[in-house]
């Protein structure tokens, strides 16, 4: 755990052997992987806190469509599946225009 405050917790993933997305990123070659448990209200503050642990000028992959409300990425990819039970992501498309 890197940080814990009301409304958020930030962790660095160090175990590539688990079946979590963060572990899969390590297995795929990521040098560092962070994940956060965060309320919508604290999302931007938590992202800024994570950035303090990342060297300047390197590519960053974020698995959070909600960050699109706050930042303009160099590349925005969103995947959808008709069989997925995950959150409806259609609201994020409007920000691409």
Image (tube, rainbow, N blue to C red):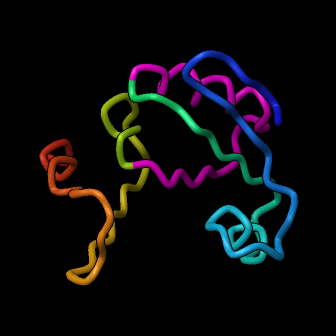
Q: Does the segment drawn in magenta span residue 20?
A: no
- Quadrant in the rendering for residue 2: top right
Q: Nearer the viewer, residue 2 or 76?
A: 2
Residue at 40% x, 20% y is: 41
> x, y (%) of residue 4?
73, 23
Q: Nearer the viewer, residue 89 or 61?
A: 89
Q: Nearer the viewer, residue 73 or 35?
A: 35
> x, y (%) of residue 39?
46, 28
Left/right placement of residue 40 relative to residue 89 reads: right
Work out which residue is located at the far bottom of the displayed protein and give it: 83
Check the picture and name the quadrant holding the N terminus.
top right
Vertically, is 82 above or below 51? below
> x, y (%) of residue 80?
27, 73
Left/right placement of residue 13 relative to residue 60 reads: right
Residue at 36% x, 56% y is: 76
Magenta stretch in the rendered image? 41-64
Q: Does the segment drawn in magenta span residue 48?
A: yes
Vertically, is 47 above or below 62? above
Work out which residue is located at the far top of the displayed protein and give it: 6
- Quadrant in the rendering for residue 51: top right
Residue at 21% x, 57% y is: 88
> x, y (%) of residue 19?
69, 75
Residue at 53% x, 32% y is: 38
* Count of numbered badges drawn on the protein: 0
Vertically, is 8 above or below 81? above
């Amino acid at each position: 755990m890197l940080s814990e405050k009301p409304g958020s917790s930030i962790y660095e993933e160090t175990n590539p052997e688990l079946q979590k997305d963060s572990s899969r990123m390590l297995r795929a070659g990521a040098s560092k992987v962070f994940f956060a448990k965060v309320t919508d209200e604290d999302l931007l503050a938590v992202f800024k806190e994570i950035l303090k642990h990342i060297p300047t000028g390197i590519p960053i992959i974020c698995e959070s469509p909600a960050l699109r409300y706050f930042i303009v990425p160099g590349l925005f990819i969103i995947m959808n599946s008709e069989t997925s039970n995950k959150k409806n992501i259609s609201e994020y498309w409007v920000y691409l225009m």
